[in-house]
Every structure is written in structure tokens, then in C-alpha cells.
Amino acid sequence: MTNGCRWRVRPTATAESDFRNILRWIAERFGYIQVRIYSEALMRAIQALANGPHVAGSR
């Protein structure tokens, strides 16, 4: 459910670097299939943030 308010979500350079490092760590330990699963889940979560402060489960 949205309230009509859309947010613009932009990760900082530090967040992007952290994301790359996390994916590298996952790849080394669990393989590239798990990297894909994790990165897709994280991207869906970030995209959901664009729906604003009233996203189900955000509290």
C-alpha cells in the first residue's frame, strides 16, 4: 500500500562499495547462484523503499 508519495532512493558511494564487497564475500563462500539470489532480494527491497514511508513491514 502506498500513500502516493514516492521517494528517490540513491545509495551512497560507501553503500555501493559495501554492496560489492558483500557480493564478493558471498561469491567466495557460497557461489554465484547465491550472489544472484541475494542481490535480487536486496534490489527488490531497495526498490520497495521508493514507495515511501508507509511500505508494509517498514516499521
Image (cartoon, rainbow, N blue to C red):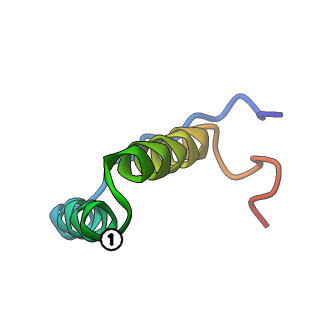
Counting from the top left corner in percent of width and height, residue 22 is at: 30, 68
Residue 38 appears left or right of 31? right
Residue found 78% across the figure and 34% down from its top? 3
Residue 36 appears left or right of 28? right
| In-front residue for pair 53/31 | 31
Residue found 22% across the figure and 59% down from its top? 16
Residue found 28% across the figure and 60% down from its top? 27
Counting from the top left corner in percent of width and height, residue 45 is at: 57, 48
Counting from the top left corner in percent of width and height, residue 49 is at: 57, 47
| In-front residue for pair 52/38 | 38
Counting from the top left corner in percent of width and height, residue 12 is at: 24, 61
Residue found 51% across the figure and 41% down from its top? 7
Q: Quadrant of the C terminus?
A: bottom right
Question: Which residue type carries mark 1?
Answer: Arg
**Total tally of numbered discs in the picture:** 1
Q: Helix, strand or loop at disc 1?
A: helix
Residue named by callout 1 = 29
Q: Quadrant of the N terminus?
A: top right
